[in-house]
Amino acid sequence: YCVGSGQQRLLKEYILDIYKAVWREDATEEEVGIGKRPYATGQVMFLCADIFELEGDIGSLPYTPFEEGIRQTVAWYRSRQENE
């Protein structure tokens, strides 16, 4: 199954959310470097998981916003690093 929200978002939004979760919550697109390089031919601009089949087989799906899920993932990873 493809896992995601089924909602289209700009790739730069995912990148910025990940950067904020790992480094600094108040980071800006400029700090991250978004837009510093020209886009490649055929560059993916939007990402959207097709969850039609998953919804059909399971029905109602739980939802965690990407920003929250990535923060939880980073916190989990960091806690494991501290315990090793």
Image: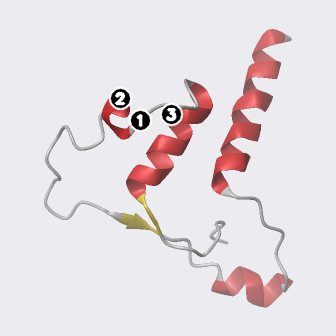
Name the residue tied to disc 1.
Answer: 28
Residue 60: image location, x then y, percent: 85, 82
Query: Pointers 2 and 1 in contact (CB under 8 A)?
Result: yes
Secondary structure state at the residue bearing disc 3: helix
Of the two numbered discs 2 and 3 in the rendering, the one whose residue sits closer to the viewer: 2
Q: Residues within 10 Å of mark 1 (few under 14, many from 20)?
A: few
Q: Earlier in the sequence, mark 3 or mark 1?
A: 3
User: Which residue occupies 82% across, 75% down?
Assistant: 61
Residue 55: image location, x then y, percent: 75, 84
> Which picture quadrant has residue 32?
top left
Q: Residues within 10 Å of mark 3 (few under 14, many from 20)?
A: some
Q: Amino acid at mark 2?
A: Glu
Asked if residue 84 shows in the view, the reply is: no
Q: Residues within 10 Å of mark 2 (few under 14, many from 20)?
A: few
Q: Is residue 58 above or below residue 66?
A: below
Name the residue tied to disc 3.
Answer: 19
